[in-house]
């Protein structure tokens, strides 16, 4: 079964992040926290091994910590109105964390507040084949 390639998944994760950031009350500076690709060792979809999950996370720099609630709520509202399903909603806690999954492409996103009060925003793909198609003999 064809999937996005790793490169396409990285681009889609970036698109999801850019769209979410556009919904914020003001635009933060995005600083890459990490961008990686890791093998799906325990695929949640019970599919074959050899696929990868691609993820990217940014720090939302320039957001005063006293506005974190406002920014997290803005992301929550954006996600709810744009086809994302809420998986975790811990907006009222000191370590704010919200995670969601897109109903159309199964990409997951989250926003998290660090102990220091900084916000990070990330997106990760479902398991994809590196080149978009299974290698010969995979899943047999």
Image (spheres, rainbow, N blue to C red):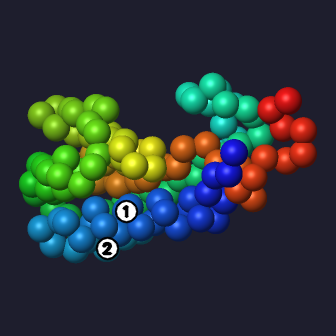
Viewer can see residue 29 = yes
* Residue found 47% across the figure and 60% down from its top: 13
Residues 50 and 31: in front is: 50
Q: Considering the image in quadrants, where does the N terminus appear?
A: top right
Answer with the quarter of the image where residue 46 lies.
top right
Residue tagged 1: 17
- How many numbered circles are shown? 2
Could you say where residue 82 lies in the image, as x and y percent from the top left? 24, 54
Q: Residue at x 31, y 32 (%)?
A: 87
Mark 1 Cα shell of 10 Å, populated few (<14), some (14-19), many (≥20): many
Give the numbered dot on residue 121.
Answer: none
- Crowding around mark 2 (Cα neighbors within 10 Å: few <14, some 14 to 19, many 20+) is few
User: Can you give x and y, in whole percent of width and height, for residue 73 in the image?
Assistant: 13, 49
SS category of the residue bearing label 1 = helix
Examine the image and state in which quarter residue 138 appears: top right
Disc 2 designates what residue?
A: 29
Q: Measuring 90% from the left and 39% from the top, which residue is drawn there?
A: 137
């Amino acid at each position: 079964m064809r999937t996005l390639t790793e490169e396409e998944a990285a681009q889609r994760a970036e698109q999801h992040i850019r769209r979410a950031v556009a919904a914020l009350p003001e635009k933060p500076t995005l600083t890459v926290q990490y961008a990686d690709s890791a093998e799906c060792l325990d695929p949640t979809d019970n599919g074959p091994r050899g696929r990868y999950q691609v993820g990217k996370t940014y720090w939302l720099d320039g957001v005063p910590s006293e506005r974190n609630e406002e920014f997290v709520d803005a992301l929550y509202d954006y996600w709810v109105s744009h086809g994302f399903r809420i998986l975790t909603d811990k907006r009222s806690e000191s370590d704010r964390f919200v995670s969601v999954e897109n109903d159309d492409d199964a990409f997951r996103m989250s926003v998290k507040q660090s102990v220091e009060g900084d916000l990070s925003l990330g997106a990760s793909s479902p398991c994809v084949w590196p080149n978009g198609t299974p290698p010969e003999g995979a899943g047999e």
